[in-house]
Amino acid sequence: MPEAATEATPETKSEEFHGIELTVIVPARNEEDCLGACLESLVSQSSEFFELGCEWELLVVDDGSTDRTRAIAANFPNVTVLSPQKLEKGWTGKANACWTAAEQARGQWLLFTDADTIHEAGNLRRAIHEAEKYNVGLLSYSPKQLVSGLWQRALMPLVFSELALAYPPEKVSNPELRIAAANGQFLLIRREAYRVLGGHASVKGDILEDVELAFLAKRRKVGLRFRYAADALSTRMYRTVGTMIEGWTKNLALLFGNCLILAAWRALDIFLLIGVPFLAWRYWRYGVWQLPWFTAGILLLLVWLRIVWRFYARAAKSNFPASDCILSPLALPLFVILLYRSWFQNKVLHRVSWKGRHYPV
């Protein structure tokens, strides 16, 4: 029978520090609604030739949860449950949790993955092989996004289409270009590369620690590969509209340096998508029997169809289903508000909130 999950402390570092191939690290704070599915997808990848507890290990860091997160993790065999070090001033909770686990990890590779992810069978070994094939020290995946409800289905394609345009994977993966990005939902890094970057201690106060690690990887030339990976894993980032609003308020201004300009362009989209057909209707209503006015209305309608097509083509870059991209214009006002709200909190108030904690920025 496999051993039950064990409680670990900072004093339990193993003598055989480099004895296994991979350490999977899952930081978790109040994740009772998703952690079980995540761990199930990870534990099920244990096999005769890639056995959990022998060839790889799985560490869950319970970051001060007040729900059943710790109990859920403890129910899984061969999963080690850790408590993070004391959260010092200047550290984010996630960076502190990841750093705690990394200090105890024994793997040659470290995989940092979020509690809301679901991993496809064989994903762990394939990811290591991919990193070795492309000779990179840091491999990051953008997962398939799972959404529910009208507002998630409409807003998420807008955000991810902008991310796809701001951080094209082919440019991010090009060592000759300075542009860098990573997704903390799946961040695989070679132990030596992690040491060269300074680990999470080097990004301890950064809200987007994953992106900052990617920039360090580019600057210190450890090799970076980033891609959309629906074949590897999926995630449901937000389970409610409220957490979605809180999450993007925290992140948008950090992801897009031109936050207010982007808000202005998306406000222009609202005007064009609504205003152009309204103007065409006005022409037809008051001048339908007068050929010049009727022709002007037809031309405006053609212009509007082109605007709609270009908008859809942009949204389609998000890798969301066509049905969600079609809904995305409905969320344009919300997206504009979130861009402004994120700018205000980050640039004016210089503070953000996430999961009951407040951080200066």
Image (tube, grey):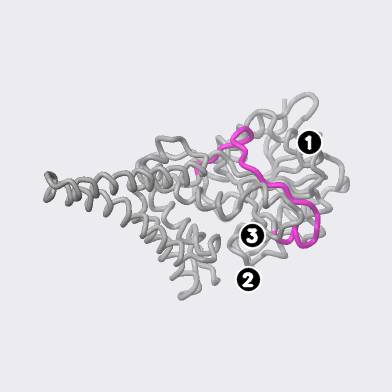
Residue beneath label 1, please?
129
Q: Residue furthest front?
A: 291
Q: Measure the C-alpha gap from mark 3 to mark 1.
A: 25 Å
Q: Is residue 175 above or below residue 123?
A: below
Q: Quadrant of residue 70?
A: top right
- Give SS at disc 2: loop
User: 1 or 109, which is in the foreground?
Assistant: 109
Q: Where's residue 175, x and y in %? A: 76, 54
Relative side of 203 to 340, left or right:
right
Residue indicated by mark 3: 209
Q: Depth check: 123 or 327 in front?
A: 327
Q: Closer to the camera, 18 or 172?
A: 172
- Badge 3 or badge 1: first in the primary sequence: 1
Crowdedness near tag 3: few (<14), some (14–19) or many (≥20) residues, C-alpha within 10 Å: many
**Disc assigned to residue 90:** 2
Residue stretch rendered in magenta on the structure = 215-236
Task: State the image coordinates of residue 182 (x, y, percent, origin top left).
Answer: 65, 52
Callout 2 amino acid: Gly
